[in-house]
Amino acid sequence: MTARLTFILLVALMACAMALVASQHKARKLYVELQKEQAVAKQLDVEWGQLQLEQGTWGTHGRIERIATRELNMRLPAANRIEVVAPPRVEARP
């Protein structure tokens, strides 16, 4: 009887040990995958920052004015041709 109980306990111990090894292996694989995804996320964050900087550069007033004058032949109107339009007044409702 004790030999049979010892054998059953040995089999249970081996099954637990194999399950432990398998779960540790899976945890390591998932950790490596997490590290790779974090590296990709960091690279995308850097690229996003560069794109925002580029967008800011493309939209500067100096660049827009330079393109308007050189490529579109736009000029500021004479001072006597400029009209200032006042916004409509909003009256309070009773």
Image: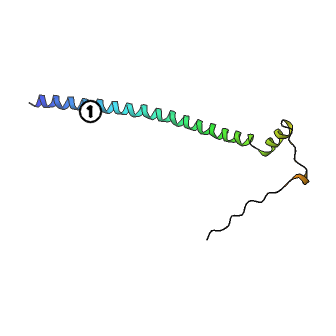
- Residue 56: x and y, percent? 71, 43
Q: Residue furthest left?
A: 1
Nearest the viewer among 87 and 63 is 87
Q: Is residue 5 left or right of residue 43?
A: left
Q: Residue furthest front?
A: 94
Residue in view at x 55 percent, y 34 percent:
40
Q: Is residue 34 left or right of residue 42?
A: left
Residue in view at x 70 percent, y 40 percent:
55
Q: How is the image coloured?
A: rainbow
Give the crowd class for mark 1: few <14, some 14-19, many >=20 residues within 10 Å: few
As displayed, is residue 78 above or below residue 35?
below
Q: Amino acid at mark 1?
A: Cys
Nearest the viewer among 4 and 33 is 33
- Residue 47: x and y, percent? 63, 36
Q: Residue furthest bottom?
A: 94
Asked where in the image residue 25 lies, by quadrant, the reply is: top left
List the residue tagged with mark 1.
Answer: 16
As displayed, is residue 14 above or below residue 42?
above
Nearest the viewer among 60 and 76 is 76
- Residue 23: x and y, percent? 34, 33
Name the image quarter holding the N terminus. Answer: top left
Residue in view at x 88 percent, y 48 percent:
77
Residue in view at x 68 percent, y 67 percent:
91
Name the image quarter holding the C terminus. Answer: bottom right
Q: Is residue 29 left or right of residue 52?
A: left
Q: Secondary structure at mark 1?
A: helix
